[in-house]
Image (cartoon, coloured by chain):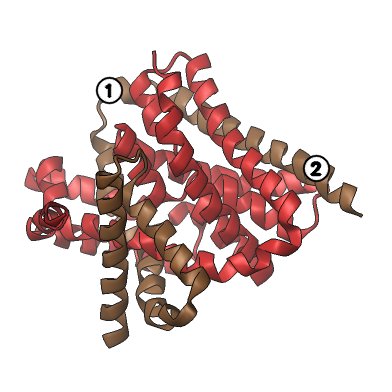
């Protein structure tokens, strides 16, 4: 329990640091993402925070689907002008996924082969 | 910087009974998902959200009130995004050995996933609001959500788009790996993580821990790159 709370407090502190820095420096990236990058940098130099973070981070990530329930429920309230375009939207999502996966395979095959 | 804390506190303190709808819907979804042997198409979100929608129709609750009542869950998305740094930092140790192909595949793959989606949106003549909502669809949901909030898309549409992308990604990848004879599970993992985010990463962990580790790397680094590049360049695609 203690580790969970300390971990959550560390995560919230880094989120606050990220959001403050984005605001102060007028950066064009999401604040919580900068918080994540800052934590990543700290963890790559100093692992002593890691045991304190493990419980909170693994629990948050494990139940992340629960946190997405309100946002996803919002999809039912999108309105007809969006829903009318749903077939094209689905086509965009599937086609771009095919293209990106195929492209990545080509890059990997070209580079991985050249090393051997 | 106390205004940031005040803003967050406002979100948390608006939490009220609608959060119980979410918890009940999710508990039912989780139960069915586990009973089904964790079939991707019966993901807890797929079951919980229509149930909650019908409950809202019956008790006549509008979305704004429901969303505000779920303040604590919406707030927790912030720390959950920061939490992604922990598994990512554990996987970054793998990086140096394969730096060249890894960086190239990641950079091109991630950029291509986003760029091809944006160009297809234009090609199909879809509206700008849809473009803004789909832009982050191949990024892991908490990061994607923060990007879409930043650039001003519809979060509900993004939530569905990331889910569809993840599910399509794992189905398509299976065929692709067979057709192109890509057998190295490190690369399979990387492709799953970059193009199908958390859903692809879960699939990669089913294959092997090594495959999952590379998926985690791909998902995390692609998320960071997209969050840095997209808000600054999205203006180029808006008329």
Kindly tell me whether residue A84 is visible in this rendering: no
Please tell me whether mark 2 sits on a helix, a strand or a loop.
helix
Count of numbered badges drawn on the protein: 2
Q: Quadrant of the C terminus of chain B?
A: top left
Q: Quadrant of the N terminus of chain B?
A: bottom left
Q: Which residue position is annotated with label 2?
A: B179
Q: Which chain is red?
A: B
Q: Respond whether the residues carrying marks 1 and 2 are from the same subunit.
A: no
Q: Where's residue B68, x and y in %?
A: 12, 49
Q: Please tell me whether residue B119 is drawn above or below residue A14 in the rendered image.
A: above
Q: Residue at x 31, y 62 (%)?
A: B79
Q: Where's residue B131, x and y in %?
A: 41, 25
Q: Which mark is residue B152?
A: none
**Dot 2 alpha-carbon crowd within 10 angstroms: few under 14, some 14 to 19, many 20 or more:** few
Q: Please tell me whether residue A69 is drawn above or below residue A41 in the rendered image.
A: above
Q: Colour of chain A?
A: brown
Q: Residue at x 49, y 17 (%)?
A: B122
Q: Chain of mark 2?
A: B
Residue at the farthest bottom position: A2
Q: Which residue position is annotated with label 1?
A: A80
Q: Is residue B32 left or right of residue B15?
A: right
């Amino acid at each position: 329990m203690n580790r969970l709370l300390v971990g959550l407090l560390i995560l919230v502190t880094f989120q606050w640091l990220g959001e403050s820095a984005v605001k102060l420096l007028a950066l064009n990236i999401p604040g919580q993402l900068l918080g994540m990058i800052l934590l990543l940098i700290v963890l790559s130099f100093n692992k002593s925070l890691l045991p304190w973070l493990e419980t909170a981070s693994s629990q948050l990530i494990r139940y992340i689907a629960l946190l997405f329930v309100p946002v996803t429920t919002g999809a039912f309230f999108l309105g007809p002008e969006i829903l009318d375009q749903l077939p094209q939207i689905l086509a965009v999502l599937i086609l771009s996924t095919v293209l990106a996966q195929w492209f990545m395979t080509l890059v990997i095959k070209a580079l991985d082969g050249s090393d051997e | 910087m106390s205004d940031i804390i005040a803003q967050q506190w406002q979100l948390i303190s608006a939490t009220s009974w609608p959060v119980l709808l979410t918890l009940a819907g999710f508990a039912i979804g989780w139960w069915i998902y586990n009973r089904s042997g964790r079939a991707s198409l019966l993901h807890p979100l797929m079951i919980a959200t229509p149930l909650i929608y019908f409950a809202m129709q019956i008790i006549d609750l509008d979305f704004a009130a429901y969303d505000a009542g779920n303040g604590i869950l919406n707030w927790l998305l912030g720390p959950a995004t920061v939490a992604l740094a922990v598994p990512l930092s554990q996987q970054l140790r793998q990086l140096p050995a394969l730096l060249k192909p890894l960086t190239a595949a990641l950079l091109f793959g991630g950029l291509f996933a986003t760029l091809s989606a944006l160009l297809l949106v234009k090609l199909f003549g879809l509206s700008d609001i849809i473009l803004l909502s789909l832009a982050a669809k191949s990024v892991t949901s908490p990061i994607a959500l923060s990007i879409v909030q930043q650039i001003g898309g519809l979060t509900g549409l993004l939530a569905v788009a990331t889910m569809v992308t993840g599910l399509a990604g794992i189905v398509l990848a299976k065929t692709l790996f067979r057709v192109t004879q890509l057998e190295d599970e490190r690369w399979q993992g990387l492709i799953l993580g970059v193009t199908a985010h958390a859903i692809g990463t879960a699939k990669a962990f089913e294959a092997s821990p090594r495959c999952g580790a590379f998926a985690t790397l791909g998902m995390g680094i692609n998320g960071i790159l997209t969050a840095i590049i997209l808000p600054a360049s999205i203006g180029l695609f808006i008329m």
